[in-house]
Amino acid sequence: MTVSDPVVESIVATVTRSATEIRQGLVGRRNTVDDEENPSGETQFAADIWADELLAERLSTIDGVGQYASEEQSDVLECGAAPGSSDTYAVAVDPLDGSSNLTSNNAMGSIFGIYADSLPARGDTLVAAGYVLYGPITTMVIATDETVSEYELSGGERRLIDQDVTLPEDPVAYGFGGRVPNWTDTFEAYAREIESELKLRYGGAMIGDVNQVMTYGGIFGYPALESAPQGKLRLQFEGNPIGYIVEQAGGASSDGEQSLLTVEPTDVHQRTPVFVGNDGLLERLEASLEESV
Ligand code: AHG
Ligand code: MN
Ligand code: MN
């Protein structure tokens, strides 16, 4: 099933084709690169840099892509007409999400958001977003304003397996990042409630954990920490695209106070607390955190 907007379809097809190569290219690129940090100040793996170069080259040359930005590059790459003009978009990419899982050979992903505005952009200017999950099977989830679809990827092609992905009503799984002593007291109180109700599923790669929530229902979060009040995850490359996908699938997103898609961006690499999942769980979270104010 192709996406109706031809530029969006071209971006999705390019990511599909590249995902097979990215997965194969992880072999031999599990080393960290000395003296290299990403704009968030984090150590880079050879695979991070390689996946970013591959996607940057292919996505920035698509007609209709006006900007390319990734968590691995400081600056936004201007590559065409200003996004927001007719059929011109900005693409924000997390080329390899959960790359620290390369060391332990656990699941990872790639994330992309397609914005109809110049970066940094609000999440509610997204026209589509998607993620690839490098699990036992390589799958891809794509959300547009019409629907959320899931595909199996192989040989550079995608095969539709679900054309109306929706979050199950009854939540099952939860996963919260950060270390417990670093959580705020109010978040810890909420987490204690949730852990008495749901099953822990936390694998250290947002995409692997979010896919559990998309499959079984529940909540994934990387909260504000005492040591990092803005949390760890990046709004443009992780929070917005995943928030858009989960909201399109009938769930909710939050930074603890509001939908991630309404957060006013100030910087391409800004971090934000991220919560996505069943709306009832997020309503309880926001109520809990509000009590502390
Ligand atoms: P990335 O590899 O793109 O930097 O993302 C890693 C993120 C996210 O995937 C995951 O939810 C989180 O880091 C895990 O952080 P901890 O290692 O602190 O649990
Ligand atoms: Mn990431
Ligand atoms: Mn990454």
Image: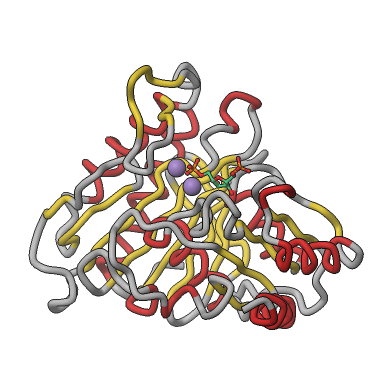
Depth check, front residue: 52 or 224: 224
Outermost residue, right side? 196
The quadrant in which residue 195 appears is: bottom right
Residue 191 vertical placement versus 22 (above, below):
below
Q: Is residue 150 left or right of residue 78?
A: right
Measuring 31% from the left and 48% from the top, which residue is drawn there? 70
- In which quadrant will I find the C terminus? bottom right
Q: Inspect this view and state whether residue 279 appears.
A: no
The image position of residue 180, as x and y in percent, is: 74, 49
> Is 151 displayed left or right of 96 in the figure?
right
Nearest the viewer among 59 and 73 is: 73
Q: Is residue 250 above or below residue 193?
A: below
- Give the x, y percent position of residue 19: 44, 42
- Farthest residue, direction front: 293
Quarter-wise, where is residue 72 in the image? top left
Q: Is residue 236 above or below residue 179?
A: below
